[in-house]
């Protein structure tokens, strides 16, 4: 009897050991134990703010965290305020910041007290396409004829955009370089304002992303000339009576030199966090990006479905920075 009980105890001990060993990684895996603060590197109501609050809503609705989340806006300096704040809280793994390519491009043009490498990249969760827009009854009906008019006489041709030394002006400079044109850039406070100014014919074009000019396109005030992408957009549903996003030709098709121009929607942590902590938020953002609410957000704003993390995200940042550095240098923007 003693041998029988001994064998049973041995088997039970072995089973317990196996179970406990398999359970240990799950028990030991890091997760936040206090509320997570989500900083938005932009003002209330803008695209970055909308994304930050969507992420918070999805996390809450789907119970993706065992703690609460708090969203705070810090949009000063085109978002630099939020990134510097993150640098100053090195090692705090209960903080995230939502931005765009501003996180790594701003330090190229201004002395801000941080570099993107001071922070920890988590993920890029989507990309924005850029579209060349003009007003509805413009004499040019495609991008090729528009740029022929620009090169013939640029004195009355003005490109509007959001902010100075930002993505819209960078794209305008790239176009000037590749087409040999001298298009004048007029900065406005936002893409929405640039859309209103174009609808009123105070400028001849802008390079808004899709959502910024959506209402004016639906209202028959603006028309898209081309999208700065290697392929046409993947949204075939009609936006106007006869046109969808997928009907917009690429700028490459129209002979413009800029083959593709996008910016990423990024999530970063402070520096000094562990690989395990970063990995936790990578998987959290991956789960967020796979929800129906996030996919509906992509469709509604005609965003490019993208998920980058780790080496792929770092490579993206390095390539994007390298592409615009010569543009910034020629324009005299590059910080010395």
Image: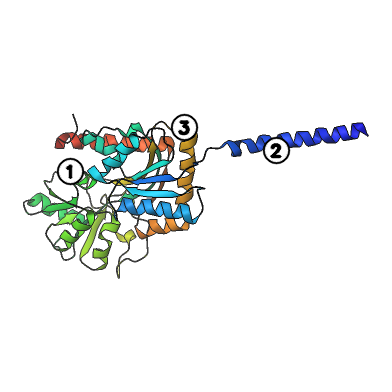
Q: Nearer the viewer, mark 1 or mark 3?
A: 3
Give the position of the N terminus as an image quadrant. top right
Classify residue 110 as left or right of residue 307: left
Q: Nearer the viewer, residue 273 or 109?
A: 273
Q: Nearer the viewer, residue 249 or 6?
A: 6
Of labels 1 and 2, earlier in sequence is 2
Numbered circle sitting on residue 26: none
Crowding around mark 2 (Cα neighbors within 10 Å: few <14, some 14 to 19, many 20+) is few
Residue 9 visible? The answer is: yes
Real-space CA distance between mark 2 and mark 3, rounded to the nearest whole angstrom: 27 Å
Check if mark 2's residue and mark 3's residue have beta carbons within 8 Å.
no
Numbered circle sitting on residue 19: 2
Classify residue 129 as left or right of residue 275: left
Classify residue 227 as left or right of residue 96: left
Q: Which residue is at a point 24% across and 34% down the rendered structure image? A: 112
At mark 1, the secondary structure is helix
Q: Position of residue 247 (x, y in %)?
A: 31, 61
* Residue at the extreme top of the image, as rendered: 336
Q: Which residue is at a point 86% across and 32% down the rendered structure image? A: 6
Tell me if residue 140 comes above or below residue 11 in the rendering.
below
Crowding around mark 1 (Cα neighbors within 10 Å: few <14, some 14 to 19, many 20+) is many
Q: Which residue is at a point 32% across and 66% down the rendered structure image? A: 239
Classify residue 158 as left or right of residue 44: left
Q: Position of residue 93 (x, y in %)?
A: 44, 37
Check if mark 1's residue and mark 3's residue have beta carbons within 8 Å.
no
Numbered circles on residues, count: 3
At mark 3, the secondary structure is loop
Q: Which residue is mark 1?
A: 173
Q: Which residue is mark 3?
A: 274
């Amino acid at each position: 009897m003693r041998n029988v009980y001994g064998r049973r105890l041995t088997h039970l001990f072995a089973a317990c050991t196996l179970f406990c060993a398999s359970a240990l990684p799950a028990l030991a895996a890091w997760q936040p134990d206090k509320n997570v603060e989500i900083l938005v590197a932009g003002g209330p109501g803008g695209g970055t703010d909308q994304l930050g609050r969507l992420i918070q809503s999805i996390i809450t609705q789907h119970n993706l965290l065992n703690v609460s989340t708090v969203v705070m806006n810090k949009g000063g300096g085109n978002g630099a305020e939020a990134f510097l704040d993150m640098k100053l809280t090195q090692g705090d793994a209960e903080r995230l910041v939502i931005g765009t390519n501003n996180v790594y491009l701003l330090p190229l043009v201004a002395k801000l007290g941080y570099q993107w490498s001071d922070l920890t990249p988590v993920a890029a969760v989507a990309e924005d396409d850029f579209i060349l827009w003009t007003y509805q009854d413009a004499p040019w009906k495609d991008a090729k004829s528009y740029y022929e008019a620009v090169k013939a006489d640029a004195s009355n041709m003005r490109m509007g955009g959001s902010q100075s030394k930002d993505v819209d002006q960078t794209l305008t400079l790239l176009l000037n370089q590749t087409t040999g044109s001298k298009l004048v850039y007029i900065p406005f406070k936002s893409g929405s304002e640039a859309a209103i100014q174009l609808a009123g014919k105070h400028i001849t074009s802008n390079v808004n992303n899709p959502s910024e000019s959506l209402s004016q396109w639906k209202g028959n005030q603006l028309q898209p000339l081309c999208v700065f992408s290697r392929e046409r957009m993947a949204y075939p549903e009609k936006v106007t009576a006869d046109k969808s996003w997928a009907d917009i030709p690429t700028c490459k098709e129209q002979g413009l030199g800029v083959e593709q121009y996008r910016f990423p929607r990024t999530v970063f942590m402070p520096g000094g966090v562990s690989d395990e902590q970063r990995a936790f938020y990578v998987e959290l953002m991956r789960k967020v990006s796979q929800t129906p609410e996030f996919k509906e957000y992509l469709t509604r704003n005609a965003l490019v479905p993208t998920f980058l993390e780790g080496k792929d995200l770092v490579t993206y940042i390095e390539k994007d920075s390298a592409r615009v550095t010569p543009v910034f240098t020629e324009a005299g923007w590059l910080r010395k």
